[in-house]
Amino acid sequence: MVEFGARPDLAAAIDGWDEEFQAVYDRSDPASSGFPDEATTAAWHERGERLPSRLASALRVRTEFRTARGELVFDG
């Protein structure tokens, strides 16, 4: 992502956010995957919801982001 103009700290934030999910994702049983509690899940979603605006700003592109629930989080 850095090669497209994103700062290293933004690329690291996106990678870290994804790594958090990958750590709790069970590929053999996706339905049982997840964070240990609602507070952790909510915090992960909130961090993820801030990333699209940072990415759009860094890359100067229009970005739309919807949650897995279909809620529009960012449109800019």
Image (cartoon, rainbow, N blue to C red):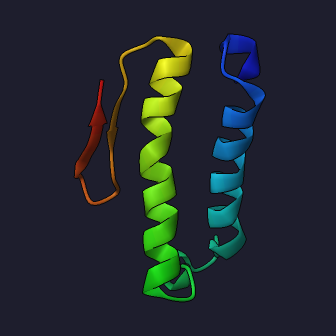
Q: How many marks?
A: 0
Say left or right for 38 vs 8.
Answer: left
Q: Quadrant of the N terminus?
A: top right
Say left or right for 40 vs 4.
Answer: left
What residue is at 35 percent from the left and 38 percent from the top? 65
Check the image and report above or below for 73 versus 47.
Answer: above
Residue 54 position within the rendered picture, expressed as x and y whole percent measured from the top left:
50, 31
Check the image and report above or below for 22 versus 4.
Answer: below
Closest to the observer, 52 or 25: 52
Residue 5 position within the rendered picture, expressed as x and y whole percent measured from the top left:
67, 13
Residue 24 position within the rendered picture, expressed as x and y whole percent measured from the top left:
65, 75
What residue is at 49 percent from the left and 51 percent from the top? 48
Residue 8 position within the rendered picture, expressed as x and y whole percent measured from the top left:
77, 29
Say left or right for 15 vs 41.
Answer: right
What residue is at 51 percent from the left and 55 percent from the top? 47
In the rendered image, which quarter is residue 10 located in? top right
Closest to the observer, 29 or 24: 24
Say left or right for 10 vs 55.
Answer: right
What residue is at 52 percent from the left and 65 percent from the top? 44
Check the image and report above or below for 29 versus 10.
Answer: below
Which residue is the extreme one toward the left? 71
Q: Quadrant of the C terminus?
A: top left
